[in-house]
Image (spheres, rainbow, N blue to C red):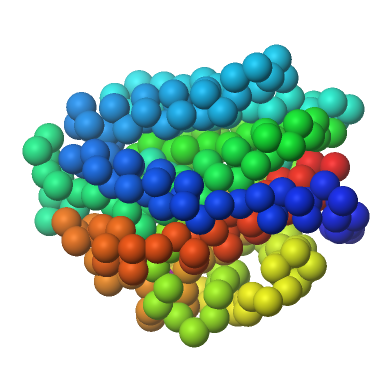
Amino acid sequence: TYLINQQALVQPMVAAVQDSLILQTIDSLSAIQNRYYTTSHGVNASNTIAAQWAALAAGRSDVSVSQFSHPSWPQKSVILTIQGTTKPKQHVILGGHLDSILSGGTTETSRAPGADDDASGIASLTEALRVLLASGHRPQRTIQFMAYAAEEVGLRGSSAIAADYLAKGRKVTGVLQLDMTNYKGGTRDIYLYTDYTSAAQNDFVARLAATYLPDLTVSTDRCGYACSDHASWFNRGYPASFPFESDFNHHSPFIHTTNDTLANSGNQAAHAAKFARLAVAFAVELAN
Ligand SMILES: N[C@H](Cc1ccc(I)cc1)C(=O)NO
Ligand SMILES: [Zn+2]
Ligand SMILES: [Zn+2]
């Protein structure tokens, strides 16, 4: 029973989302030479996100930022935790991946901007996080924002983290994945993917969109394979949802190339902002 009853909290947060700040984050992340999981730039990208999230967390004793080390490669995942007040052992998780890749192979000097895949998702998450922290709201359940390493090489960062949660018996109320939120190739606004996701939670997400983003159109589609980090959680029995930029046939054609740039995403972040608004609604409603 997914209740939607936090309108007084969520409406102002949704209104506070700024497209310009999302654009700024996409621009700075895609300016890094590449974010490949084994390069010095890929390590730098993780540290940059950790620093940016730590700056947002400043002054909050209930908020912390950590990096999750992966022994078999150098790029760390980033986890920001907002401690829950009454149900701290229950986790609401929102994620995206911080790595990038070139389909022909990626080296230390490769240019892999990954503006849509997945700087856009990280930027949408960062803006959702910003407005959530700016509100001063303290959620009942613990909310975690995660920037996963090494998604492009087999969902490896999220898989390691999800396996760790399972091994530790941690309770996960739900997971939202944002991977590619800014290239508007389809006719609708938000596409909820139905494979490797939870039907019940997807219905909740659709109702969140209807409640908080009434002007937007929502549709569904399928990937046909484990196409992003939501599958790491779903495959271990955790409820996951994956709102995506377009229908399968119209996603950004630039991904995994040197042309996955902000310019090729229309030099805008209005599309990514829709996902930031949905993310903040998901976090606050599910964590209370
Ligand atoms: N495989 C995904 C890209 C991808 C994700 C969803 C859909 I629909 C189509 C394509 C990837 O590269 N994620 O990083
Ligand atoms: Zn991706
Ligand atoms: Zn990708």
Picture residue at 49% right of the left edge, 84% below the top: 187
Taking the view exactly as shown, the residue that stands out farthest to the bottom is: 187
Position of residue 206 in the picture relative to residue 52 (left or right): right
Using the image as rendered, state which of residue 225 and residue 90 is in the foreground.
90
Using the image as rendered, state which of residue 100 and residue 224 is in the foreground.
100
Using the image as rendered, state which of residue 15 and residue 73 is in the foreground.
15
- Looking at the image, residue 184 lies above or below residue 168: below
Picture residue at 68% right of the left edge, 35% below the top: 134
- Looking at the image, residue 4 lies above or below residue 189: above
From the image, which quarter does the C terminus lie in? Answer: top right
Picture residue at 79% right of the left edge, 34% below the top: 137
Give percent across and percent down for residue 29: 33, 42
Q: Is residue 282 visible?
A: no
From the image, which quarter does the N terminus lie in? Answer: bottom right
Query: How many circles with numbers are drawn on the protein?
Result: 0
Location of residue 58 by image quarter: top right
Q: Is residue 71 visible?
A: yes
Give percent across and percent down for residue 86: 89, 27
Location of residue 76 by image quarter: top left
Position of residue 20 in the picture relative to residue 11 (left or right): left
